[in-house]
Structures are given as structure tokens and as C-alpha cells.
Image: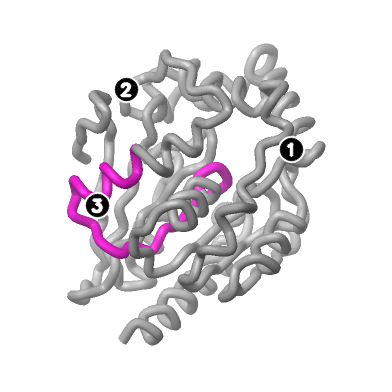
Amino acid sequence: MGFLTVKSHKIEYVILQPANHFENLPTIVMLHEGLGSVAMWKDFPQQVSDSTGCNVMVYSRYGHGNSDPKFDDRGIQHQHIEALEFLPEILDTLEIKSPILFGHSDGASIALIYTGGLNRDVAGLILMAPHVMVEDLTISSIEAARDAYNNGDLKQKLCKYHDNVDSAFYGWNNVWLHPEFINWNIEEYLPTITCPVLAIQGFDDEYGTMEQIEIIKRKVTNVDLLKLHTCGHSPHRDQPLHVLKAVQDFVSNTLGGLS
């Protein structure tokens, strides 16, 4: 575990190596969900590294995990700030070039904004439960999460993953429930994405429907979809074997295309 200073904020990160390491493979950069952190991924990043042969870099965004807590209000542009300002500096500091970006939920949206919004090399995108627009289902579930945090046991469950759990929760929840966020949409970034994309969605996702990845399929030229039954908002936890196999195949095919 290490720390970077990005925009005057301490950011925790870790770089994992596979059991059988191969030179000259792209680094997979994993971007966590709205309530995620390095610790919340558990052993999944190491499984990704071992199954693909790639180094995997994982970090906790500002306000999450052991990174500095977030006290400033970024408003509804928080994902754009992460994608267009923080992520480029993190990659440059660690000298990671042409990564495969592997994002979950908000992390997947950040990966799309970064790839479509900047003229920087990306070898591939793996998107689990991505958001490209706001659905009524999403807002209802985020309202339910606020109730569970304020009146249930969600805060207690999240405490072990974040130094400042209120920073992590409200930094996410307040943005999604902001009245103006209902019009948030990142479809404009999709047509300029040219790298291969794997988009994964569960049929039982409480935060989004299949329309999210169908939009990506319609607007990006090179997209494979993985639709999973008996799967909610966290495919890597609900269907880990299916996800790992799909990731392994995607990385293998992408590297074949790069060679």
C-alpha cells in the first residue's frame, strides 16, 4: 500500500502483480463504485491480475478508503472532475501508459468520461454496471440507501472500508440525490471511444437496467456485452466466475489485437 499526493490530497493505492508475470502487458486500473475503496474490492483485483497476467493498480478516490476525506462540494460534476483531472494525474505520477480501465458503477462512468473526453491512449475498457444516464430505479435505490445509512446498519457495514465513512457516503449520496442530477448524462463521450469495450450488467441490478449497456453498444463501435442472470449491482461478487472468465477472454483478445 502506498500514497500519492494529487491536487493536494492524499490518495491511497496499491499495485498488484500476478503469480506469473509477463513483461510489456498493459496495467489494469480498477475504478471502484460510489461507496467503494481499495479494501472493498477484497481479493478480486488479485484474481484479475492472476487470471490476466497483468499488473493491477487499485486506488481509493478522494473521500474514500484511507485517502483524504472530502469536505468540499463538487456538485454534480464530481465524476467529470475525477475523470478529467484526478485520474490523468494519478496515471502520470505512476507512469502508467495506455491502461485497461476496469470500472464498477460510478467508476465505470469515470472510465467512459476519461476515455471519451481526453486524447489519451486507453487499451481497453471493462465496465461493470456502468451509468451513462439517470434512471428512476437508480434514484429510488439511492434514496433507500440513505435511509439504510441513517436508520439501519449500512453505516456500520461501511465503517471498516473508510477512514471517514460520512465523507464517503454523503460525497456519493448527496450528488446522486441533487435535484439537478436527474439530467446528468454522459452519452456525448461515447462516439469518440475507439478501444475495445466489455460491458457487464446484471438483470437484477437495483441501480440500473440493461438500457445502460445497450446505449453503450449503440454508440461505441467495438463493444461486447455480458448480461448475467441472478446478478445485482456487483457482478464480481454475484457471478465471480463468469466475470473473471469474461475479463480473461477480453484481455487476451485485446492483447492479441495490440500485438
Q: Mark 1 or mark 3: which is in front?
A: 1
Per the image, label 1 sits on a secondary structure element best described as helix
Spatial CA span between label 1 and label 3: 32 Å
Q: Give the camera-side residue of 176 and 245.
A: 176
Of label 2 and label 3, which has the lower sequence position?
Answer: 3
Residue under pointer 2: 68
Residue under pointer 3: 15
Give how far across and how far down residue 28 sits, in percent: 35, 61
The quarter holding residue 142 reads: top right
Of label 2 and label 1, which has the lower sequence position?
Answer: 2
The residue located at (60%, 64%) in the rendering is 199
64 relative to 68 in the view: left or right: right
Per the image, label 2 sits on a secondary structure element best described as loop
The residue located at (37%, 19%) in the rendering is 69
**Few, some or many residues within 10 Å of mark 2 (<14, 14–19, 20+):** many
Residue under pointer 1: 138
Spatial CA span between label 2 and label 1: 27 Å
The quarter holding residue 67 reads: top left
Give how far across and how far down residue 173 sits, in percent: 61, 24
Query: As shown in the figure, which amino acid type bears the numbered disc 1?
Result: Thr
In this picture, which residue range is highlighted in magenta?
86-107
Query: As shown in the figure, which amino acid type bears the numbered disc 3?
Result: Ile
Queried whether the magenta region covers residue 93, the answer comes back as yes
The number of numbered badges drawn on the structure is 3
Q: Is residue 149 above or below residue 239?
A: above
The residue located at (66%, 43%) in the rendering is 185
Q: Is residue 238 above or below residue 82?
A: below
